Amino acid sequence: MGDDLGDEWWAHEEKSDASELEEETKEPTEKIKTRPEKRKNVAEKTNKAKKKKKTHVQEEPAVPPKKEPEDNKPSQPKRKRKKKKKTITDVLAAAEPKPGSPADLQALVTQFFSNKRSVIEQEELQLQSSCFLSSNDLTHTLSSYLKQVCPKWAKIQKQHTEKSSVVLLVVCSSALRTIELIKQLTTFKGEAKVIKLFAKHIKVEEQVKLLQKGITHVGVGTPARIGVLIDKEGLNLQALRYVVLDWNWRDVKLRRMVDIPEIKLDLMKLLDSGVLAGCKENRIKLGLF
C-alpha cells in the first residue's frame, strides 16, 4: 500500500503538519500586536472626549445670576437711633448763667441730707437769711466782692492772733483755681498772710506745720484738703468768721463746683464739719462769690 500512495501522500501530510504549525505560531504574534493597538485606541478616544468637554465648557456663555425684583426683597426693620443723653455741659450751654443765691445753697444742703438725716435733724440744717453775706452778681472780682462784704477787714485782721486758724476761708474747686484766686486777693488782703490749702504737691503735714508756725489770716483751697486738715486738727474753726464759696465760676465744661459730684460731696462734708453749726450760732457768715 505504501507504494500505491506513493510519495505524494507523505508530502501532503508534511505540508499539512507544517501549515498547522505555522498557524499555531502566528496566533500569539497576532494577539501581541492587537493589545497595544487597543490601548492606543482607548487612550485616543478618552483624549478626544476630554477635548470635546473642554471646548464645550469654554463655548458656553456665562449666565448672570437672576436679580430679584426690588419689590419682592424682604424689608429689613429700621434700627431705632438712641437719643443722646444731655450732659451738664449741654444744659448749662443752653441756659444763661445766673448768679447763685442763698436759696440755691439751702436747697442743695436739704437735698443732699434728705436721705441721711431725720426730719428733726433736717430742720436744724435750715439757715436764716442773717447767716448769709450778699451774693456776687457776676460783676465783681474777688477783691471787690470781699471789700463789699468785709468793709472792716483791716481791723479784723489786726485782732486775729490765733495760730492753726484763719479768719477768712475761700473754698474753690481745684489747685489752679486756688492760685488764680490768691492773685485776685492782692488789693484786698493788705498785710494779711494767705495760705494755699490744696493737695497738689503739698503734704498735709507741711500745711499743718505752716499753720502752727505763725498767724494766718486767709486760707484758700479745695474742700477735700480743708476737710482733712479739720479732721486732723491741723486747722480749727475758732477764729473763722467768713466762708466764701466760689459758687459761680465754671470750668472748661461749664461746670460749677457743685456740678462735679466728687467736689460736691467734699463740700457737703466740709459744711457739716462745723461750718453750718457756726452759722446757726451766728459766728460764721456764708458768701457765694
Image (spheres, helix red, strand yellow):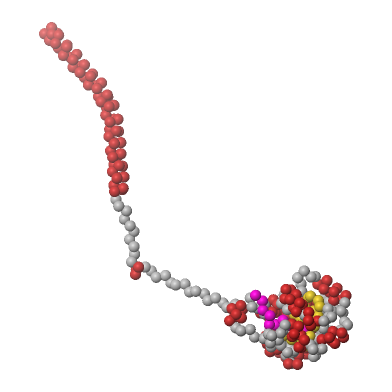
Residue 1: in magenta span:
no
- 112 to 79, vertically: above or below: below
Instruction: Give the percent coordinates (x, y) of residue 120.
Output: 73, 90
Instruction: Give the percent coordinates (x, y) of residue 234.
Output: 83, 76
**Residue 254: quarter of image:** bottom right
Q: Nearer the viewer, residue 43 or 251?
A: 251
Q: What is the span of residues highlighted in magenta in the rendered image?
A: 243-252
Which residue sits furthest top? 3
Instruction: Judge from the rendering whether residue 21 lies leftward or rightward of residue 214; answer left or right.
Output: left
Kindly tell me whether residue 124 is visible in this rendering.
Answer: no
Residue 244: in magenta span:
yes
* Residue at the image position 79 percent from the left and 85 percent from the top: 242
Q: Nearer the viewer, residue 26 or 249?
A: 249
Kindly tell me whether residue 66 is visible in this rendering.
Answer: yes
* Residue at the image position 71 percent from the left and 77 percent from the top: 173
- 66 to 216, vertically: above or below: above
Instruction: Give the percent coordinates (x, y) of residue 178.
Output: 75, 76
- 3 to 275, vertically: above or below: above
* Residue at the image position 19 percent from the left and 13 percent from the top: 14
* Residue at the image position 59 percent from the left and 78 percent from the top: 90
Q: Nearer the viewer, residue 123 or 81?
A: 81
Which residue sits furthest left? 4
